[in-house]
Image (tube, rainbow, N blue to C red):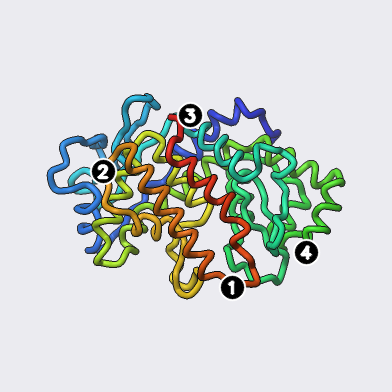
């Protein structure tokens, strides 16, 4: 299938990546507690409607600047306790795509195939998805192969060499090798493909964040579960909050890996929500989220091996986190 232009891909991505997202369903006794924390026993607004079966419709979000639908809605009675997440508008998805492109690559198409100084993996695509060479330990996760699978399932024809490398590992072992290869037609072809499929990639990033949200509450320590749930809903129900949540997951992960982090301390979205003071929807929630993210990232640097010199990245990280304060939607 031929790669279509950016404008055409908007309709495809919204259909496949957002409105087509599968609903996360959790079958456990703990889910009752999670629903209670997320929605409260006296919820007044319901955006889910019953269907003839047991599967609820996904609530619509029309993209109005002045109104938001709830981040979560409990499933209708008799639906096995599933969580229903609202759709977002194509405008909001476009905004998230543009912001992540700017955050990761400075909106420079040449950096869609990249290798950052001091890292031992390539950074690919809109979200700078990690791609490790074969045989190298994927400490920060090997996420680019999964993105390639998403693009294929969405009808994008990958170059043959990319399909092969997807299962074998990145074909470059150092930054120098990649910089040299970027002059070849093969890498230029991949770079162009990643530029044309930005919205599909954004939809993939959004879906990853959506899948993680119910898990964040369940994974939180019992003592802080109420706070994590309250803060998650506060951010998701604030205009621009979806950008903050989605971008941070793409930036530093969900924080669900107990074996991750330095000195037993992770730095993902769960840790940021746990570090926040209990918040209500509104501008202050975005400030609180950005403040907590800054503290968590400073803690990461403090815990990191000195040889990595992670302090050199703090200014850039801080600039990115500060975009969460005023998303502009």
CA distance for labels 4 and 3:
38 Å
Tell whether label 2 touches label 4 (CB within 8 Å): no
Q: Which mark is residue 305?
A: 1
Q: Is residue 97 above or below residue 37?
A: above
Give the mark nearest the N terminus, 4 or 1: 4
Disc 2 crowd rating (10 Å Cα; few below 14, some 14-19, many 20+) is: some
Nearest to viewer (mark 3 / mark 1): 1
CA distance for labels 1 and 2:
37 Å
Give the mark nearest the N terminus, 4 or 2: 4
Tell whether label 3 touches label 4 (CB within 8 Å): no
Query: Residue at the location (77% across, 49% down)?
Result: 160
Label 3 element class: helix
Tell whether label 3 touches label 2 (CB within 8 Å): no
Nearest to viewer (mark 2 / mark 3): 2
Query: Residue at the location (40% across, 56% down)?
Result: 272
Give the mark nearest the N terminus, 1 or 2: 2
- Judging by the rendered image, the residue that carries numbered circle 3 is 90
CA distance for labels 4 and 2:
47 Å
Query: Residue at the location (70% across, 38% down)?
Result: 108
The reply, left or right, for residue 250 in relation to residue 138 is left
Q: Could you say where residue 25 lies in the image, as x and y percent from the top left?
A: 33, 53
Q: Could you say where residue 324 lies in the image, as x and y percent from the top left?
A: 45, 41
Residue 91 or residue 31, whichever sits in front: 91
Query: Residue at the location (48% across, 29% down)?
Result: 90
Q: Which mark is residue 274?
A: none
Give the mark nearest the N terminus, 3 or 1: 3
- Judging by the rendered image, the residue that carries numbered circle 2 is 280
Residue 153 or residue 253, whichever sits in front: 253
CA distance for labels 3 and 1:
42 Å
């Amino acid at each position: 299938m031929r790669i279509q232009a950016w404008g055409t891909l908007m309709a495809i991505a919204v259909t496949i990546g957002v409105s087509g997202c599968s609903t996360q369903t959790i079958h456990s006794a703990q889910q009752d507690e999670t629903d209670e924390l997320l929605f409260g026993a006296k919820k007044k607004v319901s955006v889910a409607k019953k269907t003839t079966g047991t599967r609820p419709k996904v609530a619509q979000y029309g993209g109005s600047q002045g109104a938001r639908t709830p981040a979560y809605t409990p499933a209708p009675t008799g639906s096995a306790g599933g969580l229903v997440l609202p759709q977002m508008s194509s405008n909001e998805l476009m905004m998230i795509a543009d912001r992540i492109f700017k955050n990761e690559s400075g909106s420079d198409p040449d950096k869609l195939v990249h290798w950052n100084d001091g890292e031992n993996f390539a950074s690919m695509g809109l979200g700078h998805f990690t791609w490790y060479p074969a045989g190298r330990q994927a400490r920060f996760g090997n996420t680019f192969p999964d993105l390639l699978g998403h693009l294929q399932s969405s009808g994008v024809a990958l170059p043959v060499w990319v399909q092969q490398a997807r299962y074998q590992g990145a074909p470059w072992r150092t930054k120098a090798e990649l910089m040299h290869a970027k002059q070849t037609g093969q890498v230029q072809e991949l770079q162009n493909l990643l530029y044309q499929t930005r919205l599909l990639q954004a939809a993939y990033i959004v879906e990853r964040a959506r899948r993680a949200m119910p898990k964040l509450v369940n994974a939180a320590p019992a003592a802080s579960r109420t706070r994590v749930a309250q803060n998650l809903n506060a951010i998701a129900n604030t205009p621009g909050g979806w950008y903050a949540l989605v971008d941070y997951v793409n930036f530093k992960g969900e924080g669900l890996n107990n074996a991750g982090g330095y000195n037993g301390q992770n730095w993902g979205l769960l840790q940021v929500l746990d570090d926040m003071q209990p918040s209500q929807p509104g501008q202050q929630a975005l400030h609180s989220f950005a403040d907590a993210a800054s503290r968590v990232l400073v803690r990461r640097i403090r815990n990191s091996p000195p040889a990595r010199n992670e302090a050199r990245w703090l200014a850039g990280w801080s600039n990115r986190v500060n975009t969460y304060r005023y998303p502009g939607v």
